[in-house]
Amino acid sequence: MGEGHGITPKVKIRYSDKYPLSLAGQALSTRESVDARYAVAVGTGDWAPFQSKMDWEVARWAKLRGQGSTAFTDLLAIDGVRDALGLSYKNSLELNKKIDDHLPGRPKFHRHEVVVQGEAMELYSRDVMECIQALWGDPDFAGELIFQPERHYADDDEVIRLYHGMETGKWWWKTQKEVESKTEKTKCTIVPVIISSDKTQLTQFRNKSAYPVYMTIGNLPKHIRRKPSCQGQVLLAYLPTSRLSHITNRASRRRCLANLFHHCIKHILRPLEDAGHAGIVLTSGDGARRRCFPIYSVFVGDYPEQVLVTLVKTGKCPVCPAAREGIGSLDSIHPPRDSGPIRRALRQIKHGPLAFTRACQSAGIKPVQEPFWLNLPYLNIYESITPDVLHQLYQGVFKHILAWIYSACGEDEIDARCRRLPPNHHIRLFMKGITQLSRVTGTEHDQISRFILGLLVDIRLPDGLSNARLVRAVRALLDFISLAKYPVHSSQTLDNMEQALKTFHDNLDIFVDLGIRDNFDIPKFHFAGHYRYFVELYGTTDNYNTEYTERLHIDMAKDAYAATNCKDEYPQMTLWLERREKILQHDKFIRRRVNTASQINLIKPLPSLIPLRHQIMTKNPSARAVSLDDLRQKYGATDFVPALSRFIAQYQHSTYSKTHIERIAATLHIPFSTVPVFHRLKFWSHDVYAADPLAKNIVDSLHVEPACLDKYDNIVPGRFDVALINYGDGGASGVQGYCAGRIRCIFSLRPSASERWFPHGLPLKHLAYVEWYTPFRRSSFEPNSKMYRVSPLMSGGAQKVSVIPISLIRESIQLFPKFGPAAPTSWKSSNVLDQTSVFYVNPFSDRFQYSTIY
């Protein structure tokens, strides 16, 4: 697959390398594989318990893609359909019975009744130990499981430490030592248990909600955990969603709701108390048996969930004992609370309610009778509350800053600038503006964050205030968010992240001077100061991002509810999920059994910042014969013939001087009047953890196409994107050797022309006509926004152009126009690159560009 771009590990030190006598992660013995036992359960035959491939694929379609049980039954009731397909079932009931009776699955849900002050509620949960075994024993994960902690370094001297997967964090290493010390056993394997919970709406009008709890294990690589299709997460329970509205006292109701949550989670996680101390034997998909210690490690949730879990009061930090007043300052960052005094206060309940309430008040927590984490081993709950990029940064800090920007700069001007941004593959254009958006999602905030800096570079502020601090604050925040999302961190990038946070806080007083805020005592602003600590403890933030659990709501809550009759829904939802999981598990089993001979053993690349990218062009041109006149008039390639002549002369005589090349080019005759033209240049990379690891995933694209008419005869403006081009000795990062250029056309030479000019062959199949912008120079670096300023590169009164091989094109980039005091009304998104002459290069369109231009 090849190594990607950016920092990668050079030195790996496993725990067993440091402590060889520990035999950490080694197997105790081996038994038959999980697939062998599964095959016995379902019976003989490639498609068992189904009769044929058709029989199985129709069943899979019905359960994963079908329109519903009644519609499927009606379909099979059509005369001749069942016989024509050769199905072993004649309706949905028979199919469901076959799935229930013959397909092994993940643990079943069990119903429990919970009564709070006379109100009975239902809790549906699974056995947590069975769920851990289901994940551990999945044959698809057998070759991916991580059995011991590691330390990774970017240099041979082991100075620059790297963090990415959970196994590279300090928590796993520390816990491995603690377990071995207390148990005095060898061959110990830690199983980090990751729990997440989040209440979600099931309907828009009837106010139906669900409260799912998800579980996964840190032994699975983060690339698997974050893909719902890999089934690396398990729905552990549906918690009661009652608001206890029959309790009229609000304080009493809040206490009862908190106790209800902790009581239910404690019931679910109680088996971890003994298993974490004594250990259990787990069998992986390949049959290897290991002594495992499942230990609660990480809680993933938004701020209300974090406060609920840690018992702290709203408005305070769920990690450290920072005071509510002044919590927005960087000086308020402290190490996580010591859970010892908290546990002692909670155990005062045996001395009566008054002593218990006073002890909790003194400890600064809410009086919850028995938190679920009280007796879990090797756990400080205040160290398990991890960063949440979605809710803390995008839906928290950035959302606040955006609202303050609207107030300071004016909504009309912000929207006017939004409508005049040029298009780019990575950027969503908000042609109606952004200020009137309602219920803005995290994805939309992510998109807005990619271009907001370009709207503010030269914007006016009220009362003649300089916008320098505003630009510095926004740039620093965007730097922090971009760095916080890195999939691989080094001690150096963590230093950069902390410096960005400091710069952000140093410039926040601009909003005080504007009269918008008088303090920044917001817990989400505060929590950003804990990011480095948790990255070093548990690995990068994509190990525990709430975006993944938000996505799970669709599969495991919303779709499950949609499959019910909306009455007494939870028994139907859990049964629907169990059957769906059985189908998915059986699908993976059949794929392994049928495709055994064709399975490819891929060598996984080392972790990197960005996967390796490749260019791809369509096999056939978008237009087979575009005349040279059309290239000039429709594509804007006004100097196509001279530029191509210079390219040919330079390629034929690479050692000649520039003057000599110009002379030769002037004498060249172009013997054709049309060329084949391509309207797209795409970049792709592999996802080695996808169901099809050899699939080419498009990660970037350049549009190079003239104006045309749509099917309604409306004019669709032309689009000629800007690219970052390696014109010299451009490296993996930094701007040296790179220049921005606007691609006016991508073409290829006809074979007759290639043979005439290049008798020994031209290895360059595709060429591009480029309009150049000024090179990146220190003098063009704007210090507040930290963006490079570029303009069309002029020569003899015209913009300098060249023909280049497309292999020199590194990526697409977006240029921000220099708007001035107010956005000119004549500018549009489709013509702004032609209308203005001063631009700023956007470094935030995607991570590849950020790591290059930053």
Image: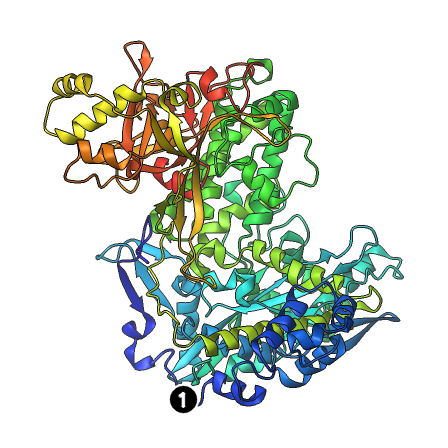
Q: Position of residue 790 (x, y in %)?
A: 37, 22
Q: Position of residue 126 (x, y in %)?
A: 66, 76
Q: Quadrant for the C terminus, please.
A: top left
Q: Position of residue 285 (x, y in %)?
A: 46, 80
Q: Is residue 189 above or below residue 854?
A: below
Observer able to see residue 778:
yes
Q: Name the residue located 34 percent from the left edge and 51 percent from the top edge.
A: 612
Q: Nearer the viewer, residue 77 or 313?
A: 77
Residue under label 1, please give it: 30
Observer able to see residue 327:
no
28 left or right of 254 in image? left
State the scheme by which the image is colored: rainbow
Q: Nearer the viewer, residue 2 or 521?
A: 2
Q: Quadrant for the N terminus, please.
A: bottom left
Residue lying at the far top of the rendered structure: 797
Asked which quadrant contains residue 721, the reply is top left
Q: Is residue 827 above or below residue 1?
A: above
Q: What number of labels is visible?
A: 1
What element does badge 1 sit on? strand
72 left or right of 181 in image? right
Q: Name the residue located 78 percent from the left edge and 66 percent from the top edge.
A: 564
Q: Nearer the viewer, residue 815 or 392?
A: 815
610 left or right of 50 in image? left
Q: Nearer the viewer, residue 503 or 773?
A: 773
Asked which quadrant contains residue 683, the reply is top left
Asked which quadrant contains residue 619, the reply is top left
Residue lying at the far left of the rendered structure: 655
Q: Position of residue 256 (x, y in %)?
A: 79, 64
Q: Name the residue located 65 percent from the left edge and 24 percent from the top edge.
A: 411
| Amino acid bearing label 1 | Thr
Q: Name the residue located 53 percent from the left edge and 53 percent from the top edge.
A: 387
Crowd rating for badge 1 (residues with CA inside 10 Å; few <14, some 14–19, many 20+): few
